[in-house]
Amino acid sequence: MLHQLVQCKKRLPLTHFENDYDIQATIHADIENKTNEEIKSTPKTKEASYSRPINPKTHPDESKEQRNQLARTVQYHKCTTLTCLRKVRGRHLCKRGAPFLRALYAWVKENREWGPKRLCEYLNNWNPAILTCLRCNHDIKLLLNGSGTHALTFYITIYATKKQTQSSNVSALLAKTIAFHLEHGKQETDAQRLNKLLVQRCTNSLSRDCEFSAPEIISYLMGWGDRFESHYYVMIYCEAAVKVLSNTFPSLSTEDVYGPQVPTRVRHIRWFNFLTC
């Protein structure tokens, strides 16, 4: 085990981590040298992800304390059969690798294995800046080989393209509701009442079974909508401007060649050439 990354930088292609201090400042997995028992005895912060971060420039001590409380709340890994425990050859093993390796210092071996300082074996890695800004659980890794980059690429691809669950897929919910409606609406002869029931059933299904994230709900309640746009778009009525330009520049007129019935494609080409010259 090497206590100084600088001792092995000639053997490892480290371009962003010049010494042991850099990796300790970037990748954290320890809260003031506390053990697992001490971490478990520390109370969690309620609604930590919704509390406002403290300015570290004006209140550095309070910001550090809040970051430690946040790390205790969101970075402590608890193994359960519903989340991470998988039965392998009669034994329950954590698919996240917990308990993690403990170390008094950040270390890197010659075979490119590495690890941060960690005294509590159930704290996963985090970055202080990301933790302060996002205020949620995350894991940060140092990639020193091609196999790690390969695994990360496949993980991100699979995670981004994973199949939606039925409770969060609006199309699946509506398809199930329409199938129920067609099956139980065969005896109904009033078309207006049948359409009203269809709208009601679709609305009830979406409001009852569809899953929404907490930020999405807050955005709806505040009237912010379901998307963010960088620009505000307005309608531009340019008929008057086109008429003035046509009178000023007769060469833009295509009626002399094609007559009154000018093909739309030709008219668009003339105006495109004028606007882009």
Image (cartoon, rainbow, N blue to C red):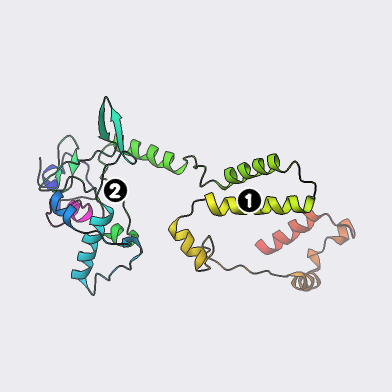
Mark 1 is on which residue type?
Cys
Q: Which of 29 and 191 is in front in this view?
A: 191
Quick one: label 1, few (<14), some, or many (20+) residues within 10 Å?
some
Q: Main secondary structure of the magenta part?
A: loop
Residue sitting nearer the eye, 169 or 24:
169
Residue 29 falls inside the magenta stretch: yes
Above or below, 270 relative to 13? below
Q: Quadrant of the N terminus?
A: top left
The residue labelled by disc 2 is 139
Looking at marks 2 and 1 on the same chain, the residue that comes earlier in the sequence is marked by 2
Residue tagged by mark 1? 202
Q: Residue furthest front?
A: 187
Classify residue 116 as left or right of residue 75: left
Is residue 138 visible to the viewer in this orientation of the structure?
A: yes
Mark 2 and mark 1: Cα distance apart in space: 39 Å
Residue 65, label in figure? none
Percent across and percent down for residue 149 are 32, 39
In depth, the one of 105 and 237 nearer the eye is 105
User: Magenta stretch containing residue 114, yes or no?
Assistant: no
Q: Residue at x 34, y 36 (%)?
A: 151
- Quarter in which the C terminus is drawn: bottom right
Q: Nearer the viewer, mark 2 or mark 1?
A: 1
Image x and y of residue 33, in percent: 11, 54
Q: In this view, does 207 lie to the left or right of 147?
A: right
Q: Is mark 1 on a helix, strand or loop?
A: helix
